Image: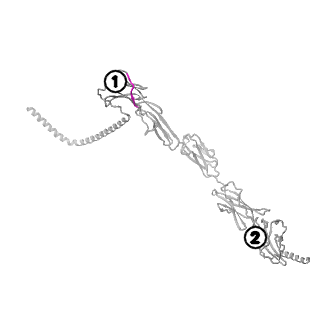
């Protein structure tokens, strides 16, 4: 048996060697696998009837074979060669399909399936390709800000653990950035990990920004090949803070400049449209050539009217870039003459003036005892009703809180004045005697009966209004009496008497004192009558002038008529004289 088996073994060995050199069999077949997945390689050969065994090998770069798996067709046993990189990773099925678990980059080789018979060796090669999807690209080492018109590194786009290596592209606002000298500079590098054989790709972008890049998103992407073809993965968007110089300066006034009044605090605020905005400025006050260095605000406290004028601010390092504004500090002065408490006598004249001085037209309102007057008060001759509390108030409507007011408390004094009236009741059973008094301070009224000197206490008094009131009594005298009314205040004591006939004797009643309201009506009626009379006089005057002109024209024509009439009269007189002589 041994002698017979030896030639057979030698024949198989020779066939394997010959197959390794001649490599007969099918064309190349490629299996694509993702990194970490299981690589499945079918043998792609028809199993012959006289198969002895199947075997898998891979080829080194120099072409030498490395056997890794063996399966007998008779014993159905599987043997894996001692190859460290494939230990516990191989699986050979009954149909001679070879599986490699946990695919690695190093598995990219040319594998060969070999089916061996007693007289031949059949081969089917397979090329294994392993792909690793890179990590999502990320923009790192980002610039904290970009400055206009300056070429500056924007950041690095990094994508890791790729196989094969990929390509990185930069985008601005969704559009691809192409290299442009001194404007867009892109530097691409890649590194392979010697252990994992995976690539890390890095693309560095230098970019000259403009103000058009404000809020403009930048992204990058990595394009790579996978088992199913080419793919692209994009990074997250990044927006950069764009620095640009100030091109314009503006000045603001707080509170709004049309509402600044004396006593207010006023803040000037200067702004530059650059980024970042300037932190310091020069402020120029009216009439000052040298600027005051300050932050972007400058405050003036308790401003006066002389603070009105032009205010300016400029950059520290560029004084020609300046802004200005005109500010009016509103003011309001009021002078009331006289003011305070003033005491005058009835009938006196009292000129009153309320003088206004303001930064613009002011409204003036007069009040008397909290009631608005239609016009400014005028006192050519004071009356008791003129007394009261007068207020002159002025304001600037456009300026909140700018109001002024002065008050005048007018006291009209007068000695007591008395007028007595009497009136018989229609029934004829009583008489009403009234003592009308005016004066200020309010006079006290006392009734007495002359002769007896007795005081009458049962009286009725009216309200004291505008320096006037009355006291009345009702009596039914059986005989003639004389009543005395006494009115007294701090200025004087006044006495007046009235004779009253017995109730049985009829007498002429005296009219009551008319009230102020009725007096005003009477005055109005008197004015109307005076107006009518004046109108009639003017009409008579016009008629007289017309008549005079008419007579002047008629004078010449009447001379001859007058002469004839004169002769007739002389003849009549002569005839009369003759008749008298004859008689």
Label 2 CA crowd tier, 10 Å (few <14, some 14–19, many 20+): some
When asked about the image quadrant of residue 188, the answer is: bottom right
Q: Which residues are magenta?
A: 454-462
Q: Is residue 37 left or right of residue 380?
A: right
From the image, tell me which residue sits under label 2.
31
From the image, tell me which residue sits under label 1.
482
Q: Give the quadrant of the C terminus.
A: top left
Seen from the viewer's position, the closer of residues 325 and 94 is 94
Q: Position of residue 31 (x, y in %)?
A: 75, 70
Q: Is residue 582 left or right of residue 197?
A: left
Seen from the viewer's position, the closer of residues 113 and 75 is 75
Residue 458 forms part of the magenta stretch: yes
Seen from the viewer's position, the closer of residues 199 and 340 is 199
Q: Is residue 423 left or right of residue 42?
A: left
Eye-nearest disc, 2 or 1: 1
Please give the label number shown on residue 3: none
Q: Position of residue 359 (x, y in %)?
A: 51, 42
Residue 126 forms part of the magenta stretch: no
Q: Position of residue 170 (x, y in %)?
A: 68, 61
């Amino acid at each position: 048996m041994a002698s017979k088996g030896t030639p057979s073994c030698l024949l198989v060995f020779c066939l394997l060697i010959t197959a390794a050199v001649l490599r007969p069999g099918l064309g190349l077949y490629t299996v694509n696998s993702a990194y970490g997945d299981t690589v499945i390689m079918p043998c792609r050969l028809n199993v012959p009837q006289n198969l002895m065994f199947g075997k898998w090998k891979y080829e080194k770069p120099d072409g030498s074979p490395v056997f890794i798996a063996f399966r007998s067709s008779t014993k159905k046993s599987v043997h894996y060669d001692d190859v460290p990189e494939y230990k516990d990773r191989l699986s050979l099925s009954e149909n001679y399909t070879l599986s490699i678990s946990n695919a690695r980059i190093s598995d990219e080789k040319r594998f060969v399936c070999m089916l061996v018979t007693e007289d031949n060796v059949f081969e089917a090669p397979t090329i294994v390709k392993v792909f690793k999807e890179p990590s999502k690209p990320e923009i790192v080492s980002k610039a904290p800000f970009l400055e206009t018109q300056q070429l500056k590194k924007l950041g690095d786009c990094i994508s890791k653990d790729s196989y094969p290596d990929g390509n990185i592209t930069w985008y601005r606002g969704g559009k691809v950035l192409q290299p442009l000298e001194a404007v867009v500079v892109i530097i691409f590098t890649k590194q392979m990990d010697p252990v994992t054989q995976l690539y890390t790709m890095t693309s560095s972008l230098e970019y000259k920004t403009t103000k058009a890049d404000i809020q403009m998103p930048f992204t990058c992407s990595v394009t790579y090949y996978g088992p199913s073809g080419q793919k692209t993965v994009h990074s997250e968007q990044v927006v950069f803070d764009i620095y640009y110089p100030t091109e314009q300066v503006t000045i603001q006034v707080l509170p709004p400049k049309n509402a600044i009044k004396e006593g207010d605090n006023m803040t000037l605020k200067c702004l530059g449209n650059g980024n970042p905005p300037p932190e310091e400025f020069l402020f120029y006050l009216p009439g000052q050539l040298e600027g005051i260095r300050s932050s972007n605000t400058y405050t003036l406290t308790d401003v006066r009217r002389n603070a009105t004028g032009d205010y300016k601010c400029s950059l520290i390092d560029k004084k020609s870039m300046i802004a200005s504004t005109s500010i009016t500090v509103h003011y309001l002065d009021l002078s009331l003459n006289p003011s305070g408490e003033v005491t005058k006598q009835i009938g006196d004249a009292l000129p009153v003036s309320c003088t206004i001085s303001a930064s613009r037209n002011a409204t003036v309102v007069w009040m008397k005892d909290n009631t608005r007057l239609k016009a400014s008060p005028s006192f050519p001759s004071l009356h008791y009703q003129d007394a009261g509390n007068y207020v002159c108030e002025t304001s600037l409507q456009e300026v909140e809180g700018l109001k002024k007011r002065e008050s005048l408390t007018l006291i009209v004094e007068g000695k007591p004045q008395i007028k007595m009236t009497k009136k018989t009741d229609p029934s004829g059973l009583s008489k009403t005697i009234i003592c009308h008094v005016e004066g200020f301070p309010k006079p006290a009224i006392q009734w007495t009966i002359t002769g007896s000197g007795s005081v009458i206490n049962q009286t009725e008094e009216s309200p004291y209004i505008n320096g006037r009131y009355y006291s009345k009594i009702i009596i039914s005298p059986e005989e003639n009496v004389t009543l005395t009314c006494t009115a007294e205040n701090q200025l004087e004591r006044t006495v007046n008497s009235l004779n009253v006939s017995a109730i049985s004797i009829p007498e002429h009643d005296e009219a009551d004192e008319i009230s102020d309201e009725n007096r005003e009506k009477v005055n109005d009626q008197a004015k109307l009558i005076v107006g009518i009379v004046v109108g009639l006089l003017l009409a008579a005057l016009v008629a007289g002038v017309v008549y005079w002109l008419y007579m002047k024209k008629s004078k010449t024509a009447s001379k001859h008529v007058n002469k004839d009439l004169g002769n007739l009269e002389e003849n009549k007189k002569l005839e009369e004289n003759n008749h008298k002589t004859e008689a």
